[in-house]
Image (cartoon, rainbow, N blue to C red):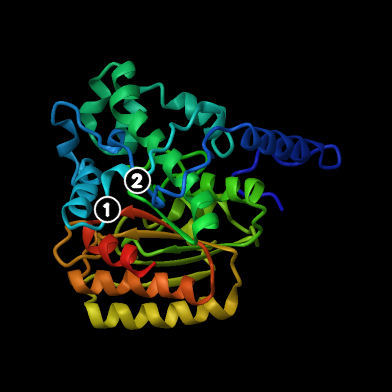
Amino acid sequence: MATASSSPPAVSGGSAATDSETLRKNQILSSKLYFDVPLTKVPVIYSSSYDIAFLGIEKLHPFDSSKWGRVRGFLIRDGVLDKKRTVEPVEASKDDLLVVHSESYLNSLKSSLNVSIIVEVPPVALLPNCLVQKKVLYPFRMQVGGTVLAAKLAKERGWAINLGGGFHHCSAESGGGFCVYADISLCIHYAFVRLNISRVMIIDLDAHQGNGHEMDFANDSRVYILDMYNPEIYPRDFVARRHINQRVEIVSGTRTDEYLKQLDKALEVAGHMFDPELVVYNAGTDILDGDPLGLLKVSPDGITSRDEKVFRFAKEKSIPIVMLTSASWLDLWDCINMV
């Protein structure tokens, strides 16, 4: 079945759609984003290139664009990770990105103004695009490489965590909300082709609606989307909401007990409705009490419980799970120790 991220509608008996899918498959098969990882490495993916920092401009957005290195630092400090045993991904190339994105969308990123709108940092518009490519877009492409590789590691090891990624506001043709590339959609398309997987469940527990992957997999029966989000905040994408298989709306001010109760119900329903071969878990910590964007009131212990519930859901059903983070060490410490 074609998805919203597929190339133009079929003509001449479906030949255009067939050609598009053949091209996509060939791009995936020739990609270098999948590579063998020795067993001495743990399935935790990170690169120092993830962090976005340039003259302090990144601090003009409330999203912490340098947190990924601190997350890794917390895990190493607490003895959860050995820095020599993490996996470094490779950068997603243009051909890799074209698996989901159109040429026109990628060309639009050659405009610093367009990138500034997507990342919501106006001064980026004033920078030469060569600097924007190096200081802003390159870190995003590295994180895309990490998300794609995470599915392969999860299939081999049962679980994998990318200490970045989860750019759930980006779809094939549109970025926004600090999300430039559709890493979730790319990860799933690679899994379809390279891992012979045909059913994927996205569990999106970021406080914001994951409108990007919802548009990319609109009406695609291979992908089941459970999205638990605050409907009162960005992006308020009512078109994308129609494509959520299981919508759980959590209003501003929702506290820990109620949040976890709703999650328990949602996971029980999801387990009955769909039998996935891979779970992609987008684990934002903007549900934390005091977060200026999420507007929820979930405690740090509540976030840990949330993540344990999702990992337990996958583990009890023997489903490989990929975890993507706009997360903190609060989440990852317990998840790594569970598996």
Q: Nearer the viewer, residue 97 or 113?
A: 97
Residue plotted at (50% across, 31% down): 105
Q: Are marks 1 and 2 in contact (CB under 8 Å)?
A: yes
Write down the quadrant of residue 265 in the picture. bottom left
Image point (33%, 53%), residue name? 325
Horizontal placement of 113 versus 22: left or right? left
Q: Position of residue 251 (x, y in %)?
A: 29, 72
Circle 1 residue: 81
Q: From the viewer's perspective, is residue 149 above or below residue 248?
A: above
In this rendering, position of residue 253 left or right of residue 310? left
Q: Residue at x 16, y 67 (%)?
A: 289
Q: Is residue 25 visible?
A: yes
Q: Above or below — where is 53 with respect to 217? A: above
Image quadrant occupied by the C terminus: bottom left
The numbered mark at residue 86 is 2
| Extreme residue in the front direction | 40
Name the residue nearer the viewer: 84 or 114. 84
Question: From the viewer's perspective, is residue 164 above or below residue 219?
Answer: above
Question: Taking 245 as reference, is 136 above or below it?
Answer: above
